[in-house]
Image: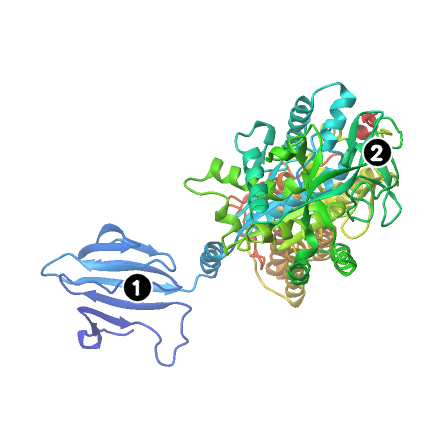
Amino acid sequence: MKKLENKELSNVTGTYYKRLSPWKNLQEPPFGSILGVVKPSHFTDPHNHHEGEIFVIIRGEGMISVDNDEQQVESGDVIYLPAFKVHTLKNSSCDQDLVFLGIWWEDIKLLEKEFRLKQKQESKQTLIFASPPTPNGDLHLGHISGPYTGADILNRYLKLKNKESHYITYMDDYQSYVSLKAKQLGKSALETSNYFADIIEDTFKLNNINVENCLRPNNSENYVQFIQDFFMTLYKNGKLLEKEAPSLYCDNCDLYLHEANVRGKCPHCLENSDGNACEQCGQPNDCADLIQPVCKHCEKTPSTINSKHIYFPLSEYENELKGYIKNVSMRSHHRALCEKMLEQGLPDIRVTHTSNWGIPVPLDQYQDQTLYVWFEMCPGYIAATDDFVKNHEIDTNWRKYWKNKNAEVIQFFGFDNSYFHALLFPALYMAFDKEINLPTAFVTNEFLRLEELKFSTSRGHAIWGQDLLKEVPSDVLRFYLSYKRAETVQENFSIDEFEQTVDDELIHCWQGWISKLIDKVNVDFEGNTPHTGGWQNRHRVFYEMLKNIVKEVSLSYEPAVFSLQEVTRKCSELVRRASAFGIAESCYKGISSQYDDFRTSIALELTAAKTLAILITPIMPQFSKHIWESLGLKEQMEWEDVPSLMSGELVVNKEGFNYFTPIKEQLAQYEMSK
């Protein structure tokens, strides 16, 4: 015991302090403490620190201010002061001391929370785009598995890490494939685009794809003008060329042919290709250079007519693009295409076509022409941003993201769109405004095949999103499409393998483990999660394994890697290793001398289940929520770079754990769209 005397108190501007520890010859406690005396009408210096702290008012009265929030305090009051909050204690008496006890400690969880908040405030704002879907039909599984679910998963991951991110896209209403579909249906292009755009948005919702803003150009008052203004800026600044060039013309249909209206062999790879770009090799063509072109409407060979059009001189930006390509994040297949095209020399790209569907060229001498839809898409991303900002924020516009160095743009699309996004669009942005933020990462996907054949709407070889999502839960489909995501090579979607993977992975392995774990808590610990007890080397090894898996999964979610195949497989590895650990540790059950070690084992297994919920939530948000609630967790889920141990005394689901059911019956009833 020690007695304190006033002479031991240090005077700091009218406030007196005495540290109560450490004591000589005694181990220092894991907290700090002081006795403080604030003299009449004085106050402590406003300050903050990284520790959590408690003030206990022993005698007197005054005012406590925490981040400018003031409250009156008196003898017997206990005040909690969070880390990093600026606080000061004022003695409001004119003749009595205010005496208080201060106790502080390093709160690791609190530090992590404050650090994440600071990270969010300092981290870049991220705009995530998926290439605009073409409203000429519903999305099939190949579309869903690629940019649309991928962009949603990245957005969920970033938000889980407390980063500001937004997932935006828009409908590719003016695509020539829309007018082609309209002709086949006997409807107008406007009717067709609106009809299928509604279906696509419904498919987004069915697959839990949370697009925060999806602009509909046909219904927008500003979109067309925005695109035309972009074009005119380039035109007036001398960034575009006017020249005569050969164009394909079908005498039988009285129609100029480009993009969706013509088919031939690619002049680069000799594979079948539509006009303007080849989806096999990813390289552009000028339509007239297609080998053996035919009109898609009548199958006749078109003639060639010289006509005047506007081009963008892509070759003038080769040096700038070479520097850009070296630094932007992209997959090897995508980078190789760009390097190949740069090595060969970039062509001029036609940006106007003779057509009756599309955005009119805003020049009198080109009244019969429309803007090439892939030229339109470049400012279309900015227009979609402008629409998002105006719908969700006040007194700002697209420049908040596209001209703000604290913001970044990430784009998702299929490999067949690679050259547009990595070469054409960046060059157009450079020509328009050199201060625009160019995308920092491109995430491409290869083609997903169906039963080893390419998806084909004309042959009826497709599975449409709405058809399947009305039969199977979205989390189940999202898992399998992530498990089979075509990241670097083409992958195959198989109905039989889909069914088998759900049975083996999700039902038998994942659900089986969590169900047994919750049953153990209900039986052995009366439904309450145990606190950790003694730690042995095997416990430390298991916990290190968890930390390593979290690190690997986190890396796999990042745009530079973005491998959902790796995420799903690492999560399955976590489940298998946690299940094996739980089985091995069950041999200690009922041995009284091993009780502390046994409850540590269960607590670590529960920690693994909690970690799984966090890791898989971007892919399977509903399943993740079910795990979270079944474990008795109430707090908001946040990403953890280092898994925090499962809290004790939480009440798990008394009814056990059941979420997945076999999908054989649903798939047996499913009929492929004809």
Direction left: furthest residue = 95
Tell which of 584 and 185 is nearer to you: 185
Around disc 1, counting alpha carbons within 10 Å, would you say few (fewer than 14), some (14 to 19), or many (20 or more)?
few
Tell me, yes or no, if residue 487 can be seen here. yes
Asked whether 647 or 255 is in front, the reply is 255
Outermost residue on the bottom side: it is 25
C-alpha separation, residue under disc 1 versus residue under disc 2: 67 Å
- Residue in the foreground of this view, choosing between 109 and 291: 291
Q: Which residue is mark 2?
A: 456
Residue at point 15% right, 63% down? 97
Mark closer to the chain start, 1 or 2: 1
Q: Quadrant of the C terminus?
A: top right
Give the residue furthest to the top.
186
Secondary structure at badge 2 equals: loop
List x then y, in percent, for residue 155: 59, 46
Give the percent coordinates (x, y) of residue 539.
64, 63
What residue sits right under mark 1 in the picture?
47
Report if the CB atoms under discs 1 and 2 are less than 8 Å apart.
Answer: no
Q: Disc 2 residue type? A: Ser
**Looking at the image, is 257 positioned above or below residue 161?**
above
Residue 424 position, x and y percent, is: 68, 50
Q: How many marks?
A: 2
Image quarter of the N terminus: bottom left
In the figure, is residue 440 to the left or right of 417? Answer: left
Q: Nearer the viewer, residue 54 or 84?
A: 84
SS at badge 1: loop
Question: In the image, which is nearer the foreground, mark 1 or mark 2?
Answer: 2
Q: Residue at x 64, y 41 (%)?
A: 377
